[in-house]
Image: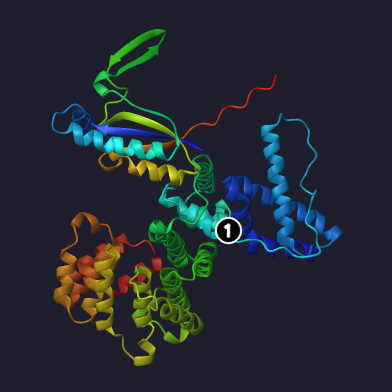
Amino acid sequence: MQYMLLLTEPETEFAKRNHPEHAGEYWAGWNAFLGAIAQAGIIVNGDGLQGPHTATTVRVRDGKRMVQDGPFADTKEQLGGYFVIEVPDLDTALEWAARAPSASYASVEVRPVLPPMPKPAA
Amino acid sequence: MDLARDTAERVARESYGRLVALLAARSRDIAGAEDALADALVAALRTWPERGVPASPDAWLLTAARNRMRNAYRHRTVTAAAEPDLLLLHLPDDSEPQAIPDERLKLLFVCAHPAIEAGIRTPLMLQTILGLDAARIGSAFLVSPAAMAQRLVRAKAKIKEAGLRFEVPFPAELPERIAEILDAIYAAYGVGWDGHHGGDAGIRDLAQEAIYLGRLLVSLLPDEPEAKGLLALMLYCEARRAARSDAEGRFIPLERQDARLWSRDLIAEAEALLIAASRFGTFGRFQCEAAIQSVHVQRPLSGRTDYSALVTLYRLLAERHPSVGALLGYAAVLVEAGRAAEARAVLESFPAEEVRTHQPYWVTLARMQDALGQRDAAAASLRTAIGLTESEAVRAFLRTLL
């Protein structure tokens, strides 16, 4: 089955990405995780995302486009990246989720990917 | 006809969980497995009276249910073209009974999986392993049948769609995962126990179902001392059921129970289990609680309750598996052991928030205050306790202490 790991981070962690003192440690943790999950050969795809300050949210209401600076929800933890992995079951997906550095200070949401829709009958 | 029906009912009772576990293990589709099994049972009642009861009714039902599941799957995936009903095709050869592998342990681990909300784990076990219907489970848990059915459906959908693992967990996580199963079984016993004074036979039976699950777990995990500890604990409690209330349904506390009404068979079985568990030499919450029960049932032999042993056991329990219940038990036996001042220190350590509406706290507090000669405070605490009591039988008993 395919699962998406939605990796969230608090602002303090996003700030470490370019911090002269903390960036090394921050990226070392993520690279180690990335290395392990890549070596397991289970990645379908995945990316890190730029921080929430780069987010723009769009809503269309009554035909009118409303554009908002910032992420869709104002929460302490924001989406920082994702992986889609191919593993036999939820338990295995949870094991990988628990290994993500952010699981220890924020959270990782694990969701099964919707299977492909059957083709509609002709 | 009667033989067919009796056999179908007996197989449904004894093999329900076994067949559901086997049918759901690969597909993770518990609801589909239950539906298929229900259809297979209907087909059995239709077929067996005519063709005779098969030599291996389990294998017959398994094959019929498998055919039904395959058929249902085809109907979903292929366009809804008419397909022959495969339910009764390819039934097993009757000549030799087939052994049905037991996958119920895997099913128990799935029901008590950490990804499943804790409150629905016990109802899931009662339904998937024992075949109890949502109405009966709902009445025991004080939830409407429709609400319980909906919660069960949602949990089964999560198991299937989120892809929970139908396997025994890895050794590293095994103790924690077994603890989740033990908790869920004990919760079923607790509901059955509390229901005792309500007079609802259906709820009372839940204690029996919990004991059935306890026995099942002991047989599936013979090297797990806590499984034995839990079963021993439930059997000690069950042994005293007849002595727990008088003819008018009034509550009788343990100390005043007529020990002649206790079931010696159940006590003997519990003692044997506790001894077997202790051979593993590891502390466990349920073993410790069972040991506490074991001390209580010694009273008729020695003529007195060994409170110093109870103080030791409760202190161990409170230290190793801290809970409000364990600390309250510790305080209560300190009072009985003539150490009310120490009990006061324990009771004062509780955060007020946590115990304000906790009836056992106020009962224990009243007992401690009484032992220290604080009659007015004791009466006030007892009145609070009565106000917080749900059971009429217990309320009536507490009033006699005022």
Mark 1: secondary structure: loop
Q: Quadrant of residue B361?
A: bottom left
Image height of A49 relative to A2, above or below: above
User: Disc 1 residue type?
Assistant: Glu
Number of numbered callouts drawn: 1
Residue B286 lies, in percent from the top left, at: 38, 69
Residue B334 lies, in percent from the top left, at: 21, 77
Residue B380 lies, in percent from the top left, at: 20, 66
Q: List the residue tagged with mark 1.
A: B103
Q: Is residue B89 left or right of residue B234?
A: right
Residue B317 lies, in percent from the top left, at: 28, 70
Q: Is residue A13 left or right of residue B283?
A: left
Image height of B112 relative to A44, above or below: below
- In this view, which residue lies farthest toward the bottom? B302
Q: Is residue B253 visible?
A: no
Q: Nearer the viewer, residue B43 or A95?
A: A95
